[in-house]
Amino acid sequence: MKHRTRTICIMLAVMLAAACLPLKSSAMIIDKRTWKGFVYTGLFDDESDKTEIQLEILNYKGTKREITIPTEIDGMRVTAVYSLSRAKNLRTLHIPNGVEVHRALADAPKLKKITVLKSNRRYSVKNNALLNKKGNVLMGYPGGYSTLKVPDSVTKIGGGAYFSKFKKIKVGKNLKTIGYNAFLENNGLETLVLDKKVQYIGDCAFSDCKKLKKVVLGKSVRRVRFGAFNGCDKLKTIYIYNKNCKIDLNKDVDQAIPDGATIYGWKDSTAQKYAEKFHLQFVELKE
C-alpha cells in the first residue's frame, strides 16, 4: 500500500484536469508534430475546422535562449504548454494571452525570466514568479532557480503546481495556504520551515519528497490534510507547534505523516494524539 496516496493524488489531479477539457464523443487526437522546435498535439472531431482545434504544446526541443509561446500553429489555437523539460538553453520566456503554462515553468532547467503583457487575462508576474491576475496566488516559478521565493503579495500556492525541483522555499509574509500536490515528488527539498502566517497544507502537498528530512510547522498552521507528507521516506523529524493543529485521520487513505517520523509537540495536543493513533514516536516540547 506504499504508493496508494501517491496514486490518489495523481488521480485527483488528472480528474480535475479532465473536467476542464471540452471533449466531444467524436473527439480525435492529432499525432505528435513539431513546429519551430515546439512538439505539440491536439484534439478535434470530424466536423472541426482548423480554428476549432485546440493544441497543447508537449515540450520545446529548440535551442533558443529566448522564446515566445505561440498562440496558434498552422491556424490552430494553442491552449496550454505541458512541459519545457527539453528546453535546455531557455533563459527567457514570453507568455501570451490565452495559453496555460504555469506547470511547465519549473521543468525548464535554466529558465530565469518570464514576462506577460498587462492585458493578459490569466496571469501576472512579480519578481519572476508567475501569479494569477490579482497577484495573490502563486501559479508557477522558473526552474532555473534553486530557491523558490514566494512574493509577499501571495496568500496561496496554487493546487497542482508541481514544484518538483526546488531545494529551498522562502515563504512570503502573507502566505496562508499551500494547495494540493504543490510540491508532489519534489526531489530537492531537505528541510521545510512553515511559519509566519501559513495555516493550511493541502492534500499530498509534499507527498513523495524523497530527500525531505525535517519539517517545522509553526503555531499558525491549523490544518494538515491527508497524505501531506506521505511517502517522504527520509522524514525523521517533524515539529508541530500549534497544540490544536488538525491532522487528517482518514482511515480510508494513507496517513499524513509517514512511519518512522518522530513528532515533536505539546502534551495532550492533536500531534500527540496523532502519534499515538499511528504508533509514531512522540517527544514532548518544553516551554
Image: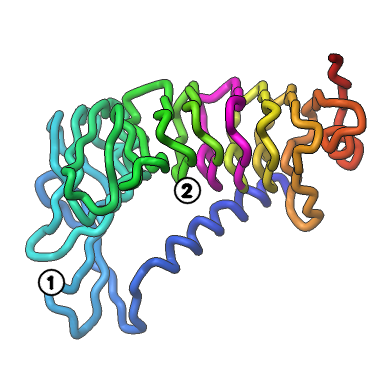
Q: Which residue is mark 1?
A: 51
10 Å crowding of disc 1: few (<14), some (14-19), many (20+):
few
**Above or below 115: residue 49:** below
Amino acid identity at mark 2: Gly
On the image, which quarter does residue 128 sit in?
top left
Q: Which residue is mark 2?
A: 160
Q: Answer yes or no: do the residues labelled 1 and 2 have beta carbons within 8 Å?
A: no
Q: Residue at x 58, y 41 (%)?
A: 205
Is residue 90 shown left or right of residue 229?
left
Which residue sits furthest left?
Answer: 74
On the image, which quarter does residue 127 sit in?
top left
Is residue 199 shown left or right of residue 182?
right
* Residue 230 on image: x %, y %: 68, 40
Mark 2 residue element: loop
Q: Earlier in the sequence, mark 1 or mark 2?
A: 1
On the image, which quarter does residue 194 sit in?
top right
